Image (cartoon, coloured by chain):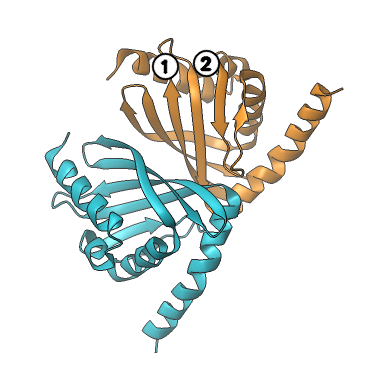
Chain colours: A cyan, B orange
Amino acid sequence: MHEGAQNFLRLWQSVVDDRDAKGIEQLLADDISMGAPPYWNRIDGKETVGYLLGIISETIVNFTYHRTWVDERELALEFTGQVGDCELQGIDLITIDDTGLITRLDVMIRPENALAALRECVAPRMLEFFERRNE
Amino acid sequence: MHEGAQNFLRLWQSVVDDRDAKGIEQLLADDISMGAPPYWNRIDGKETVGYLLGIISETIVNFTYHRTWVDERELALEFTGQVGDCELQGIDLITIDDTGLITRLDVMIRPENALAALRECVAPRMLEFFERRNE
């Protein structure tokens, strides 16, 4: 396995397991671009994506990684968890740069009710975040 | 790359590119289990999954594979396409058996409006399929 990817994977799984929002943010490149599950338009920048990932990691309980694929600096990480009463399965598609930071992250989850439940929990808190930032 | 996986990948991308429903079905194990994007409950069996994949391949236009990951008999295939006015990105998580047939397939797509549009196109046709089969 690509050494940078191997180091990244160990760090990433550790901060995600610990729900360590600060540690998660430290693994994001300044210009990270994220494709979130509900929306087509991308969310950009370390501060915003870091905040969003912090909320998501608080919202999905029993978050567990399963199969992982690594091809050079491209990774695919399968996970399962629950939002409220909804079981979910998802994937993180991750691109890391040559310093081991995430430059691109796309997240997809199934089924539809879990996706809607996640959005309903996360969207109001992101709206507050944007409103605070614009004050 | 695992030789069986390499052969499978070449065949699979060919039948999907050609929207060859019969060719797709021939790459499914009899006891295939599929996790479809909208539902948590799985869809089982070659006939049902083959029919569903045929409908999905007719419904998603401009279907294109991008990044692919292979780890022994586990594959992750990223794709993009459109349903109606909705752009979509998705992933096929595939397990093949030692004869190169799919035993497990999980499909996740984003964003939410594309997932809903896909379900709205596919669900009525699957309902007809189940009704016909039960006549």
Q: Say whether residue A13 is left or right of residue B97.
A: left
B133 with respect to A131 (left or right): right
Residue nearest the observer in this picture, B45 or B56? B45
Q: What residue appears at the point 61 percent right and 43 percent down from the top-left corner? A: B39
Label 1: chain letter: B
The amino acid on which the numbered mark 1 sits, given as a three-letter code, is Phe
Q: Quadrant of the N terminus of chain A?
A: top left
Mark 1 neighbour class, 10 Å CA radius: few under 14, some 14 to 19, many 20 or more: some
Residue type at mark 2? Answer: Leu
On the image, the x and y values in percent for residue A10 come to: 19, 47
Q: Nearer the viewer, residue B59 or B41?
A: B41
- Distance from disc 1 to disc 2, alpha carbons, whole Å, reads 8 Å
Camera-nearest residue between A23 and A39: A23
Q: Residue at x 64, y 36 (%)?
A: B59
SS at mark 2 in the image: loop
Residue situated furthest right in the rendering:
B135
The structure residue drawn at horizontal position 21% and vertical position 37%, both measured from the top left corner, is: A72
Classify mark 1: helix, strand or loop.
helix
How many labels, in total? 2
Q: Is residue A51 above or below residue B82?
A: below
Q: Residue tagged by mark 1?
A: B8
Asked whether residue B96 is in view, the answer is: yes
In percent of width and height, residue A65 lies at 35, 45
Asked if both marks, 1 and 2, belong to the same chain, the answer given is: yes
Say whether residue B84 is visible.
Answer: no
Residue at point 21%, 58% (across, down): A27
x, y percent for residue A123: 50, 69
Give the residue pinned by disc 2: B27
Q: Are marks 1 and 2 in contact (CB under 8 Å)?
A: yes
Q: Chain of mark 2?
A: B
Splitting the image into 4 quarters, where does residue B93 fall? top left
